[in-house]
Image (tube, coloured by chain):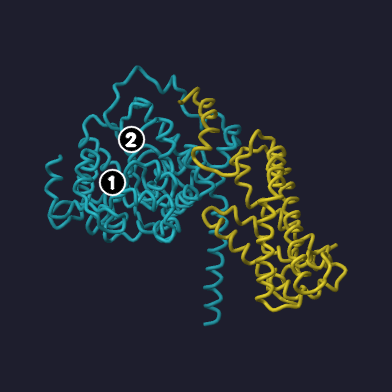
Chain colours: A cyan, B yellow
Amino acid sequence: MNELLTQVFGLIGVGLVGFVFFLFLAPLETLSWWTGLYNRRNKDRTKLAKPKDIVMPPIKPAPHYIIFLDGIAKVARDNYEDVQKFLDRLEKNLPGAVVIGSVLPYSVTNRPLTSARPLARYWRWAKARKTGNYKDLIGFSINIRNMFQVIVSADSRYGPIYNLGAARLIIEPLLKKGYPIGSGVPVTLIGYSGGAQVAAGAAPYIKELLRAPVDLISLAGVISADPGLNDVRFLYHLAGSKDGVENIGAVLCPGRWPILPNSSWNRAKRAGKFTYVPMGPMKHNGEGSYLDDKAALGNGKNFLEHTLETVTFIIKQPEAVRAKRVKKGKLEYLFDPLGPESPHIKGAL
Amino acid sequence: MSEAIQLFLLTVGRTLRLEPAVFQDMQLSDEGLRLALFTILFAGLSSQVGHSVILIANRVRPPRFAMSIGVGSAFYLFNVSIWSLSIWLLGRLFFKDVTYWEVLNVVGLAQAPHLFGFLVLLPFLGVPLGWLLSLYSLLAMLVGIQVVFDVPFYLALGVSGLGWVVLQIFQRTIGQPITTLAHRVRTRVAGLEDLRETIDAHALLEQAEVRLERETGGLV
């Protein structure tokens, strides 16, 4: 018994030391990018395209730009099947709008985990395993690696630097797709899980550099009390009742506790920027999640369809959402797409 | 040499365990003050490393970075000396006539928790950890003050609290030029026009716009 206890404590100890060690290393990519150390070593890799490459024969600006920042399972610019399906159908729902899903929010040097990195081979292996089985432990190491980057984004000191790097990655494809700077065309960031934190952090830079109104749709987002929330016009937080992850930010970030009424989160909440959108019995990821097209709601609609319709409605008719929301719940306002009012969603499509 | 290191580690360990006897032993030992000074020096270095994100945010070059850490540690020593001075004056006034060095000894040794100050670098956990270290250090100091002035805990708390108030008043009045000077020195050592003491999006953007311009040929 004693031996078992020693082993258990030994394991916990090793885990803790490992955690602290990797947490220590987590900001290094950001810092080496910011100080220019990284660029000197890898001259061509990290440079963003020059405007002469960006500004192609004038593209007609779209009426709306949407950037999807995937959760911490993302490894490269291409997407997992379910995410891509969601993006393709969202694009169909929003004719004319630009939908961008290629940004990897967890590398400020804009390098996929699967190439041009010392551990690229490992990450390719992990990705292959993850694609076969999303519960795979090796595959899950991708999530842990990216979770550390979300922690860096949420840190009050590293965060502003990391989020500037992330904002550059978002701004580049926007410009390539012809975003007209200063035109006031809305930019909507959809952040899934940890992607929502990066989106909130990047918001002030996008707003300032593109002079654009920035809205955030948090798909089960894990968000800290990021100062960037002050620069978000509206935040819609979509969360399922079986999701045990989306609430982590609310629990772990002191700025989200009611005892700090002057935190950026609580100020934005009081200003009525937040809308809570309950999504029914959806889970955070995998089977039964927001992007699952097998699981279905009571009305026969599958989860993916419902998520799509809700997101589409928010993007197409934000005024209607805000008009129909009621003062209720932990985010001050609530909009229930599954409530008795739900038929209006159909009307919107 | 190794004996000295051993003694240092042993003393630090005893301080971290908040043993009152360690402060007593140090008062009697010839090595006491030297050990206290070493503690301040290393604690200062470590906590300066812990707070160096601000230097990185300001893009201070490596040699300047090292110099800034050194100068920061010197300021740390200065702060501990002034803090000891105010406690010494108040203690003499209310309790017992001891030498300044005895108080510096206690306050210096009580910096031991800040030897872990480099952990403040940890993302997310670092800042609250820094507060915990300060609290830990304060506790060690209270134990030491009890010993050196031979007073109960609440009086030790009272005198250090009052000492803190005196220090705050000092910093905001006659200390103001010193604070300004310190900032100027830090800026100078870092080799910058202005060392920004906070990191936020709008400040970084000012710095970054130039950078984005250079990298993208004028993004904005």
Using the image, name the chain to which the residue with label 2 belongs: A
User: Total number of numbered labels?
Assistant: 2
Identify residue for label 1. A82
Indicate left or right for A283 with A108 as reference: left
Secondary structure, mark 2, is strand
Rendered view: A136 above or below A319: below
Q: Residue at x 69, y 35 (%)?
A: B191
Mark 1 against mark 2, which lies toward the viewer?
2
Q: Residue at x 68, y 67 (%)?
A: B160
Tell me where residue A243 sits by quadrant.
Answer: bottom left
Three-letter code for the amino acid on which mark 2 is drawn = Val
- Residue at the top extreme, as displayed: A57
Q: Residues within 10 Å of mark 2 (few under 14, many from 20)?
A: many
Name the image quarter holding the C terminus of chain B: top left
Identify residue for label 2. A187
Indicate left or right for A206 with A277 as reference: right
Q: Inspect this view and state whether residue A128 appears.
A: no
Name the image quarter holding the N terminus of chain B: bottom right
- Residue B137 is situated, as x and y percent measured from the top left of the image, at 66, 65
Q: CA distance from mark 1 to mark 2?
A: 23 Å
Q: Which of these two is toward me, A166 or A75?
A: A166
Q: Inspect this view and state whether residue B211 appears.
A: yes
Counting residues from the start of the chain, the first of labels 1 and 2 encountered is 1
Q: Residues within 10 Å of mark 1 (few under 14, many from 20)?
A: some
Three-letter code for the amino acid on which mark 1 is drawn = Asp
Rendered view: B215 above or below A306: above
Using the image, name the chain to which the residue with label 1 belongs: A
Callouts 1 and 2 close, C-beta under 8 Å: no
Secondary structure, mark 1, is helix
